Image (cartoon, rainbow, N blue to C red):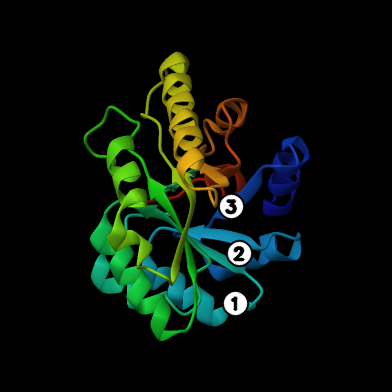
Amino acid sequence: MSVKENLNNIKSTLPEHVTLVAVSKTKPVSDIMEAYNAGQRIFGENKIQEMAEKYEELPKDIEWHMIGHVQRNKVKYMAQFVSLIHGVDNFKLLAEINKQALKHNRIIDCLLQIKIAEEDSKFGMTAAEASEILQSEDFSELKNINIVGVMGMATFTDDEQQIKNEFTRLKSIFDTLKSQHSEFKIVSMGMSGDYQLAIHCGSTMIRVGSSIFGHRNYL
Ligand SMILES: *Cc1c(COP(=O)(O)O)cnc(C)c1O
């Protein structure tokens, strides 16, 4: 099936409150344009340099989401245009995003990445660490970032019950943090293999790559 058909099939099943991020990492700009011409405007990438190159080449009404792990020294390459950074997992990174956003006179939306998976390989902070940041004075001084929710990745497993438990935990962490921080509105969870389950558990933003663009040859 074509990119357009895949996209339309997925979109036809999504509730209205769920935003689709089309994950285009490793894919050529021609694939992105196919999705763009089918109406998609939000794209996710996991490498800052790759995203910046694509940003240069592609229409400027695209919203670019950084969904991967962010290295602090590379924030400057996306500060001018990125619309949402999903993987913020420490205060120093927030401070750097704030600094670079200020240079461009922007306020950059961010999500706090929470570790919900069992695997050691997945990044993220605990609910307590997230809460501590949101309540800290240092954070209240960062005027050029806006934390609008949480992001998480479930364990890579066939055990549906485990995935469900992890998503449910992220939603409940979101609910708790939202009570302290009224700007919270996004729960970013769910990928090609588990987005239906994620929506069932309260996701408001799914990040789908291979079900739209086909399999990738590398990560
Ligand atoms: C690659 C990636 C996705 C999309 O994965 P698919 O299984 O291809 O849908 C979603 N989220 C993150 C953080 C990713 O790195």
Q: Which mark is residue 139?
A: none
Q: Write the residue at 33% across / 76% down.
A: 99
Contact between marks 1 and 2 (CB within 8 A): the answer is yes
- Residue occupied by mark 3: 21
Where residue 129 sits: x, y (%)?
27, 42
Horizontal side of 138 relative to 158 (left or right) equals left
The correct choice, above or below, for 168 with respect to 63 in the image is: above
Q: In the depicted view, which residue is nearer to us: 180 or 8?
A: 180
* Residue 157 seen: yes
- Amino acid on which disc 3 is placed: Val
- Amino acid on which disc 1 is placed: Leu
- Residue occupied by mark 2: 32
Question: Within 10 angstroms of label 1, few (less than 14), some, or many (20 or more) residues?
Answer: some
Q: Which of marks 1 and 2 is nearer the N terminus?
A: 2
The correct choice, above or below, for 9 with respect to 55 in the image is: above
Q: In which quarter of the image is residue 60?
A: bottom right
Q: Write the residue at 36% across / 78% down.
A: 100
Q: Write the residue at 54% across / 38% down.
A: 192
Q: Is mark 3 within 8 Å of ligand 1?
A: yes
- Structural distance between the alpha carbons of marks 3 and 1: 16 Å
- Residue occupied by mark 1: 58
Q: In the depicted view, which residue is nearer to us: 139 or 119?
A: 139
Q: Write the residue at 58% across / 45% down.
A: 205
Question: Within 10 angstroms of label 2, few (less than 14), some, or many (20 or more) residues?
Answer: many
* Residue 126 seen: no
Q: In the depicted view, which residue is nearer to us: 81 or 13?
A: 81
Q: Which of marks 3 and 1 is nearer the N terminus?
A: 3
Q: What element carries label 3?
A: strand
Horizontal side of 4 relative to 130 (left or right) equals right
